[in-house]
Image (cartoon, rainbow, N blue to C red):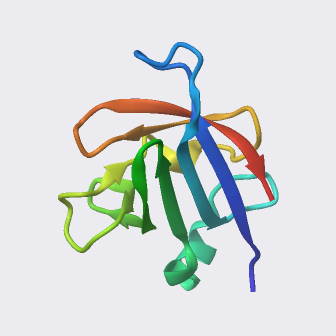
Amino acid sequence: MSRLYTVRMLLARNPGFPEGSNERGYELRVPLTADGHLDVEAWRERRAECTVRRFWHDEPDRHGELIHGRHGWAFSYEPGEADDEPLFKLEGHVFRPGEYVTVRETDGEALTFRIVSVR
């Protein structure tokens, strides 16, 4: 069985956050290939274990899952698409410290996050 990695992403430089933020980000559990890409086959096998925790200053943590639907990859916290947070071209990303991932928040704002750890 493939290993699940814990990936921590913190808010990078964005409008309103010129220095980014250590108090806003995501922690996800995902299977990765040897070169650090999302292992889609392993995700299919272990989908229920591929989770996300969104932590945001002054807001309760949100817990959900990594899903793949007709609009691509997203974080989802409840059934249906209303709360989904799409991920920009996730299948092409390499998950290693220093890389960036763009998440479209439920309000439509696209924010960039920096991967700070993969363990």
Q: Is residue 55 left or right of residue 73?
A: right
Outermost residue, front side: 58
Q: Residue at x 51, y 47 (%)?
A: 90
Q: How many marks?
A: 0
- Which quarter of the rendering shows the C terminus? bottom right
Q: Is residue 18 left or right of residue 63?
A: right
Residue 41 image point, x, y percent: 59, 74
Q: Is residue 29 left or right of residue 32?
A: left
As displayed, is residue 36 above or below residue 44?
Answer: above
Residue 6 image point, x, y percent: 70, 62
Q: Is residue 73 left or right of residue 101?
A: left
Residue 103 image point, x, y percent: 42, 41
- Say which of 96 and 64 sits in front: 64
Residue 73 image point, x, y percent: 41, 56
Query: Which quarter of the figure has residue 96?
Result: top right
As displayed, is residue 73 above or below residue 94?
Answer: below
Q: Residue at x 17, y 58 (%)?
A: 82
Q: Residue at x 76, y 47 (%)?
A: 117
As displayed, is residue 75 above or below residue 107?
Answer: below
- Which quarter of the rendering shows the N terminus? bottom right
Q: Residue at x 74, y 79 (%)?
A: 2
